[in-house]
Image (spheres, rainbow, N blue to C red):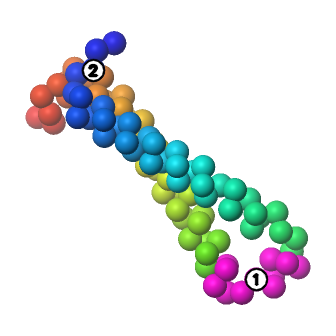
């Protein structure tokens, strides 16, 4: 396989790495909150509940970034992107 657009290739690699890092570092924190029993979860302060919600949103943004990175990386191998997005 030949890389047709090196710029898209490197952008795809960077997005893949960024998406993986977000997923890897947020998933254990989300699991911590989800594995709490109901009584402990209800005793959490409103601030910690907001942190959990933000972690969940950030996790899904990481999945989206990972998907976009995969698409850009695959697009870098296509012939029609050899000279940009014309």
- The residue nearer to you, when weighing 67 against 10, is 10
Q: Tell me which segment is drawn in magenta.
A: 39-49
Badge 2 density bin: few <14, some 14–19, many ≥20, Cα 10 Å? some
Quarter of the picture containing the N terminus is top left
Which residue is most to the top?
1
Is 20 on the left or on the right of 49, as rendered? left
Looking at the image, is 10 positioned above or below residue 41? above
Main SS of residues in magenta? helix
Percent position of residue 25, x then y: 60, 55
Q: Quadrant of residue 8?
A: top left
Marks 2 and 1 sit apart, C-alpha to C-alpha, by 51 Å
Is 72 on the left or on the right of 40, as rendered? left
Q: Which residue is under mark 1? A: 44
Q: Secondary structure at mark 1?
A: loop
Taking the spot 38% from the left edge, 36% from the top edge, the residue there is: 13
Q: Quadrant of residue 6?
A: top left
Taking the spot 28% from the left edge, 28% from the top edge, the residue there is: 76
Look at the image and tell me whether residue 72 can be seen. no
Percent position of residue 55, x then y: 59, 66
Q: Which mark is residue 2?
A: none
- The residue nearer to you, when weighing 19 against 78, is 19
Is 27 on the left or on the right of 65, as rendered? right
Percent position of residue 83, x then y: 12, 28
Looking at the image, is 57 positioned above or below residue 22? below
Q: Secondary structure at mark 2?
A: loop
Q: Which residue is under mark 2? A: 3
């Amino acid at each position: 396989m030949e890389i047709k657009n090196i710029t898209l290739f490197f952008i795809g690699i960077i997005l893949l790495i960024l998406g993986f890092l977000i997923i890897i570092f947020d998933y254990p924190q989300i699991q911590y909150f989800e594995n709490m029993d109901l009584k402990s979860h209800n005793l959490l302060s409103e601030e910690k509940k907001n942190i959990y919600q933000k972690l969940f949103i950030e996790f899904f943004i990481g999945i989206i970034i990972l998907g976009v990175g995969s698409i850009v990386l695959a697009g870098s191998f296509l012939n029609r992107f050899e000279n940009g997005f014309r």
